[in-house]
Structure formats: structure tokens, C-alpha cells
Amino acid sequence: MLDRRLQLHLASWLGQWPAGPGLHVVASRRRAQPAWDGRLRPALAVDTGQSGVLSVAPERVAAIRSLVRRAPDRLLAALPEAVGLPDWCVHDGSFRWSLAPAPLPDVGEWTDPTAPGLPPWLRLFDQPVLVVRDPDGAYLAGAGIKRHDAYGHELAVGTVPAAQGRGLARRLVAQAARRVLDEGAVPTYLHERDNHASARVAEAAGFPDRGWRAYGVYPR
């Protein structure tokens, strides 16, 4: 049985969950509201391989449903224009979650996102981020938590090229996932299909590939 927190997260994030067989286009006012980083996500979907929910703003539902009926094989390419943002891009990848992160040792320290020396992507977060620094204080790797709602928090991680291959990312993800679970939510992890390094991090941190997919329209 699917964890109730995950079900509540998907229902909140998308506007409906669960769904019957096939792809269901649903209306959600969240698609017209800023996401965790202040930017829009005008189309967002999660698909289990048997059923899926594609969430769009209410005024776009009819057009997207028509598109799904006419050309399901060209859906992704047509989504940006269908939601009125033809210059935006589509992300398509794996949707993972974990209730049992790998028992890897903690490696990072929770730090204010405005602390000196952090990369710009970590400064988008409004709550503490998890950071690894070298003995001289230089930034090596970090992770942030995208708190989409009270039930599901998505993890993001990055490592500077010089520090890759040390296992820092997987340890940061597992450490951040434990914090999310302690907060009463489910940690999720999304990555592009061709990002094999991110997939390896997810697997090592205890986020198995269940064949679920997430896709949507994002700003460039």
C-alpha cells in the first residue's frame, strides 16, 4: 500500500491522487501560483506506468485534454505551447521516494542559505541547507529541501567537480532524507532520465527506481 503521506503529497501537489488507469488531466490553481523557488510550474505530472495525473491551471484543462486525445505520443513536445509558454522547456525523468534512507554516516552541517561561499542554487532556499566544506572552509557539496507541502519534500543535491567521486552526494541525500522523515513528510527525489550520475546517487541513498515518472513545463 502506498504511504499515506505520499498520497496526500501527490493530491496536494497535483490536485488529485490516486487516479484510475491512463492519464488524467486535472485542474489545480497551484499551477498558476509560484512554487517553492518563486517560479511557476504551469504543467506538472506524475505517472506510475499504469496511471498518471497531469496537473494544469483550470483554464488550460480543455486544451490539454484535447491534446492528449489527439497526439499522446507528442504530448511532451506540445506542452509548453499548450500552456501558453512556448519558450519554456520540458523536464522528464524519474520520480523516486524513500521511507528508509540508506544508513550512511552524516557528512554535512545545516547552514543558513545566505552563508558566504554557497553556490547560487542553494541561495534559492528559505530554510537551512546541508553543506560540506573542506578544512579551509571552501564549499564542496550541498543539499536543499524543496518543501512543496506538509507531506512531501523534494531533495536537491550538487557537488563541485573537484569533490565528485567521494560519495558526498549520496550521504547528503540520505542525511537530508532522515530530516524530512523526522519532520513527518516523505522525501522525494527527481532527476532527468539521462542523468545517470544522479540516478546512482539516488539508488545509493536508498531511493529505488520504481518505474515512476515525473514531467512538466519549467522556466529555462
Image (cartoon, grey):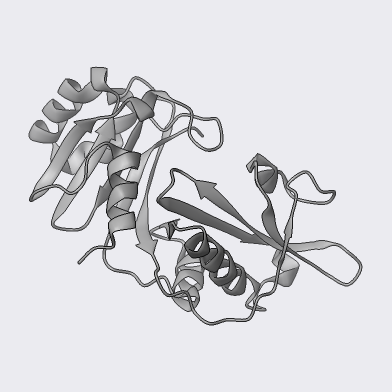
Residue 48 sits in quarter? bottom left
Placement of the N terminus among the 4 image quadrants: bottom left
Extreme-right residue of the structure: 136
Q: Residue at x 38, y 59 (%)?
A: 193
Q: Nearer the viewer, residue 68 or 31?
A: 31
Q: Nearer the viewer, residue 80 or 206?
A: 206
Residue 194 sits in quarter? bottom left
Extreme-top residue of the structure: 59
Relative to residue 189, is residue 172 drawn left or right?
Answer: right
Q: Position of residue 72 (x, y in %)?
A: 14, 40
- Is residue 61 visible in this depiction of the protein? yes
Residue 16 sits in quarter? top left
Q: Nearer the viewer, residue 190 or 104?
A: 104
Q: Residue at x 34, y 29 (%)?
A: 80
Q: Position of residue 218 (x, y in %)?
A: 44, 35
Q: Residue at x 29, y 32 (%)?
A: 79
Relative to residue 105, is residue 153 drawn left or right?
Answer: left
Q: Is residue 41 above or below residue 146?
A: above
Relative to residue 67, is residue 194 drawn left or right?
Answer: right
Q: How many marks?
A: 0
- Is residue 78 visible in this depiction of the protein? no
Q: Position of residue 42 (x, y in %)?
A: 37, 29
Q: Position of residue 45 (x, y in %)?
A: 29, 43
